[in-house]
Image (tube, helix red, strand yellow):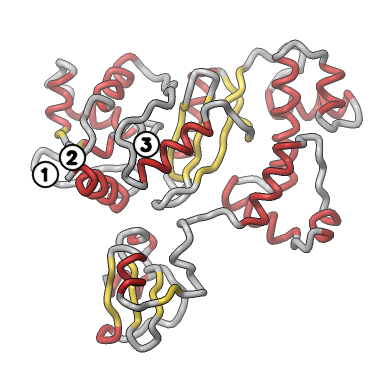
Amino acid sequence: MYNALLRKDSSFEGIFFVAVKTTGIFCRPTCTARKPKPENVEFFNTCREAIVNGYRACKVCSPLEKLGETPQYIKKLIDEIGLNPALKLKDYDLRSRNLEPNKIRRWFKKNHNMTFQAYQRMSRLNNAFNKIQSGEKVTNAAFDSGYESLSGFNDSFKSAIGDSPTKAKKQITNITRIETPLGPMYACATEKGICLLDFTDRRMLETELKELTRYMDAVILPGENIHFNLLKKELGEYFEGKLKNFTVPIHSPGTEFQVKVWDRLRQIPYGKTVSYKYQAMAIKRPEAVRAVANANGHNRISILIPCHRVIGEDGNLTGYGGGLWRKKWLLEHEQRIKN
């Protein structure tokens, strides 16, 4: 743990907190503050343990905040846009709110892979697309969503969706960002249910999003969805140890084999683990252990479809898209609650 502290190793986020005896402060393993001598530190599994032992939270790395937590001023902007998608906030408007535009731009680029202005444009398009699919005239949908000209709306729509507003047949898949104790996650949902839930730093995330658009002939846009509130509520209860079985609907398209593997994953009881070999035998394909492992790796809905409950036959933790440290945390969390 001390070596991880020296390296500022982010893979240990959520695994331990370090407390410095000489200052009385505790930190995350990635804290950028000066590193203490090994004889001056002690390690804790939780913030609570550090506080009980008399330490106070570091002001540099803020260990009491959720990893990747959205700042309050960003939340207010997102809520404002959600209530009024036609709103167009310029740099001047941000400064009038005592917000630095470059800071806002960097946060959206890092956390949503687009600038703040692009996020606003996508929200306006999402609003207009929903109105058109609900039967509204294209002209009304465009002007109600803040567009000043029909030609401007048509150009923006075709650029993002790939077709004109009158011909578009793709469905909307909404995307949102959710904070968890293990770091921020992206969630996507259709009318049928949650179709993606994964950590924002997963390497395969871009591939997963492309697969979704291909399978469902959909366009992914930021916006609200009827399933997000229940998902956030149940995820919160899961991490608090109050919920073992999720009820939020799931919509996870894939090949016939993948769907069979994912359905079987959902049958693994909370707090239990099985091997890839056992999983292959359970779907009556004992020869397909590698194919099962590959299907697990392509699971786009973490935690709800609990691929973290599958381990190697020798008991070792193997392969997890969110990182083995998260897999370890999830399994230990479920074991603690179960017992």
Pointer 1 residue: 315
What residue lies at 50% left-to-right and 36% top-to-bottom? 187
Residue 324 rendering spot, x and y as whole percentages = 28, 50
Q: In the rendered view, does 168 fall on the left or right side of 260?
A: right
Q: Position of residue 266 (x, y in %)?
A: 28, 26
| Lower position in the chain sequence, tag 1 or tag 3 | 3
Q: Considering the numbered disc 1 on the image, is that residue within a helix, a strand or a loop?
A: loop
User: Looking at the picture, how far across and down is residue 312, in whole percent?
Assistant: 15, 40
Q: Depth check: give the residue in front, 209 or 27.
A: 27
Q: Residue furthest right?
A: 149
Of marks 3 and 2, which one's residue comes earlier in the chain? Answer: 3
Mark 2 nearby-residue class (10 Å; few <14, some 14–19, many ≥20): many
Up-down relation of residue 175 to residue 288 (above or below): below
Q: What residue sits right under mark 2 in the picture?
A: 311
Amino acid on which disc 2 is placed: Ile
Q: Quadrant of residue 20?
A: bottom left
Q: How many marks do you count on the picture? A: 3
**Label 2 close to label 1 by CB (< 8 Å):** yes
User: x%, y% of residue 127?
Assistant: 73, 27
Against 12, residue 309 (above or below) is: above
For the residue carrying disc 1, how many other residues have a C-alpha within 10 Å: few (<14), some (14-19), or many (20+)?
Answer: few
Tag 3's secondary structure? Answer: loop
Residue 232 relative to residue 293: left or right: right
Q: CA distance from mark 2 to mark 1?
A: 6 Å
C-alpha distance separating marks 1 and 3: 21 Å
Give residue 302's mark: 3
Q: Quadrant of the N terminus?
A: bottom left
